[in-house]
Amino acid sequence: MHRVHTLFLAVLPFAMACSSSTTSSSSSSDAGGTTNAASVDLGKTIATKNACASCHGADYAGSASGIPGNPNVNAPNVTSDEQTGVGGWSDEQLAAAIRTGVDDEGKSLCSVMPKFGSLSDADVANLVAYLRSVPAVSKDIPATDCPAVK
């Protein structure tokens, strides 16, 4: 069981107010099924536009000292580390977490994590490709209680 399930991808609440749609005509993989550089670049643009690093850190390995505006909520490690990150998650599970706020075990993510349901399939695939390209970092983030939904 991954410790990130209740805190996955916590991003600043104001990110929900940002436009979370980035038009993209590129697919997330080439004909051989491997992630291509264009997909990774587009995914990085989407992550930057939605301020993902403001909570998860520049290395996406999470924050053990709270997130901006909510110092009692730790952002989890979303690198591909198998033990402390999302390395054991499928691309589909990662995409579902981004879009619907549900983790790899079907549980709701922390309420401060925006749901990016308006992202296109291509944008989500590109964002997943980018997250997969970020170097895995082993960083255990303490669990926190998520704030109640208001």
Image (cartoon, rainbow, N blue to C red):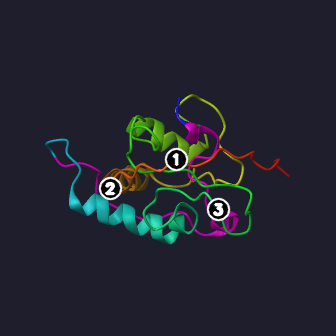
Look at label 2 and name its amino acid: Pro
Earlier-in-chain disc, 2 versus 1: 2
Q: In this view, does 125 lie to the left or right of 48?
A: left
Residue at figure coordinates x 52%, y 40% from the top left:
96
The magenta region covers 3-30
First in residue order: circle 1 vs circle 3:
3
Q: 55 or 91, which lies in front?
A: 55
* CA gap, disc 2 and disc 3: 21 Å
Q: Which amino acid does label 3 sit on?
A: Ser
Looking at marks 2 and 3 on the same chain, the residue that comes earlier in the sequence is marked by 3
- As drawn, the label of residue 135 is 2
User: How far apart are the alpha carbons under marks 2 and 1?
Assistant: 15 Å
Residue where numbered disc 3 is placed: 65
What mark, if any, has residue 140 been given in the picture? 1
Numbered disc 3: secondary structure: loop
Would you say residue 114 sits in the magenta stretch? no
